[in-house]
Image (cartoon, rainbow, N blue to C red):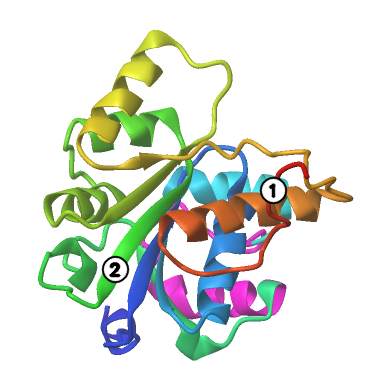
Amino acid sequence: MKENLESETERPSYVVAITGASGAIFGFSLLKALVDHSYFVYLIISKPGFKVIKDELGMFANLDTDGNLISLTGKIKDEIMSKFELHDDGFAFLDDMFLEAKIASGSAKQVKGMAVIPCSMGSLSRIACGNSGNLIERASDVMLKERKKLIVCPRETPFNDIHLKNMLSLNNSGAVILPPIPAFYNKPQSVGDMISFITGKILDSLGIDNDMYVRWKGYD
């Protein structure tokens, strides 16, 4: 707990939450982009999110992430820093059950916005209903009540009517619904190009200037 508290900063900050949907790499791409833009990031990963990360990215294979994660904070941060070439002072990892965290309150004025990427349909439903059962849901609720930017990136296909109603509810509450749907007008040459496109779109929605992707210039 103390380690998390000591990692906090008064620099302009954002929250990045990775849930149990496929596409965890999108969340890490956004984390790196925000840190590279000199913002501080509070990173939250749900328990199902860790399982997806282990399966898709091969990370945290030797860590028992099913229990309390506070004792593993240092190891989790070390692996993320090594994988994505990040510095220790650029972000803090927070256990998703750490409801006493600063970002669980509207008093955290330095926090400018939040992205839930990828967002599972379960997390989407609970955020839309105002269910603050973990830190991801509570921090999302804080963004909405404080009228700050909340970017929700639902990762599911196809959507059923329940999913769509929950998205509409969040949209009407002030959230931005930004599914990680790639574009092809920029002629992507790799999966990395597609990931950068989505990352750039999220930064755009947060009002952060970036050159993460080739922008459409229109026809002459």
Query: Would you name the residue on which mark 2 appears?
Result: 112
> Is 64 covered by the magenta stretch?
yes
Nearest the viewer among 2 and 216 is: 216
Q: Amino acid at mark 2?
A: Lys
Please state which amino acid type lies under the numbered disc 1. Answer: Trp
* Residue sitting nearer the eye, 152 or 208: 208
Magenta stretch encompasses residue 171: no
Part of the protein shown in magenta: 60-83
Please state, as top left, top right, bottom left or bottom right, where the C terminus lies in the image.
top right
Residue at 78% x, 54% y: name it: 193
Q: Measured from the top left, where is residue 18 in percent x and y?
A: 47, 52
The residue at 74%/48% (across/down) is 194
Q: Quadrant of residue 130?
A: top left
**Residue 65 visible in rendering:** no
Q: The residue tagged with tag 1: helix, strand or loop?
A: loop
Mark 2 burial class by Cα count in 10 Å: few <14, some 14-19, many 20+: some
Q: Quadrant of the N terminus?
A: bottom left
Residue assigned mark 1? 216
Considering every residue shown, the one lying at the far top of the view is: 161
Q: Residue drawn 80% across and 48% down?
A: 191
Q: Is residue 117 above or below residue 180?
A: below
Between tags 1 and 2, which lies in front? 1
